[in-house]
């Protein structure tokens, strides 16, 4: 078994694709409209789905906003340098939720950014 993808419901598909590709550096791997169901699926990631876990962005055409709820945590991305990655994300228009620095009660360097729908994305320094 292997993990294939994580799905997020997004309010504005193009805005989310732009964030994940232009701000976080992922690639748009595939996109398909389902007119009968009134939704579109877009898959983004850092590599081909046959080798990498990816992110499925689901846009229900009649829904422009979702409440995130309190059960959802975050997406985590490993980066070489959290301080540099956070600054580059800021320069590309990303919103920083937590500045880079040691995690609470630990030494691992982390930061948090928000995607356009408010989903948190954790940046974790490579060990």
Image: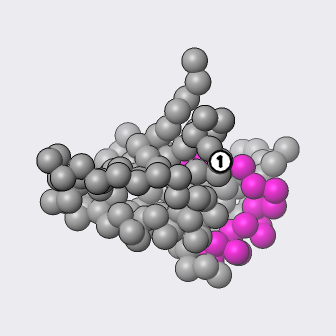
Label 1: how many residues lie within 10 Å, few (<14), some (14-19) or many (20+)? Answer: some
Give yes or no for residue 76 being in the magenta stretch: yes
Q: What element carries label 1?
A: loop
**From the viewer's perspective, is residue 15 above or below residue 10?**
below
The single residue placed furthest to the right in the displayed view is 127
- Which color scheme does this rendered protein use? one colour
Q: Is residue 4 left or right of residue 71?
A: right
For the question of whether residue 113 can be seen, the reply is no
Which residues lie in the magenta part? 74-90
Quadrant hosting residue 61: bottom left
Quadrant where the C terminus sits is top right
> Mark 1 highlights which residue?
47
Residue 54 drawn at (x, y percent): 54, 44
**Residue drawn where x is 23% and y is 64% of the image:** 64
Say which residue appears at 55% left-offset and 29% top-offset: 3
Q: Which residue is drawn at 57% across and 40% down?
A: 49
Report if residue 48 is visible in the image: yes
Q: Decide which of 16, 116 is in the foreground and name it.
A: 16
Of 19 and 69, the residue lying toward us:
19
Q: Where is residue 56 in the image (x, y as percent from the top left)?
A: 43, 47
Q: Where is residue 99 in the image (x, y as percent from the top left)?
A: 66, 67
Is 24 left, or right, of 87 in this rendering?
A: left
Q: Residue at point 53% right, 62% down? A: 20
């Amino acid at each position: 078994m292997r993990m294939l993808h994580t799905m997020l419901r997004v309010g504005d598909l193009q805005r989310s694709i732009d964030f994940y590709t232009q701000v976080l550096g992922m690639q748009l791997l595939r996109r398909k409209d389902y007119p009968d169901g009134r939704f579109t699926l877009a898959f983004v990631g850092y590599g081909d789905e046959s080798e990498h876990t990816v992110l499925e962005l689901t846009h229900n055409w009649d829904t422009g906003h979702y409440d995130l709820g309190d059960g959802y945590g975050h997406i985590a991305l490993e980066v070489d340098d959290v301080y540099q990655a956070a600054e580059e994300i800021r320069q590309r228009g990303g919103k920083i939720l937590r500045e880079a620095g040691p995690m609470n009660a630990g030494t691992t360097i982390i930061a948090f950014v928000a995607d356009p729908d408010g989903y948190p994305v954790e940046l974790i320094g490579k060990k």
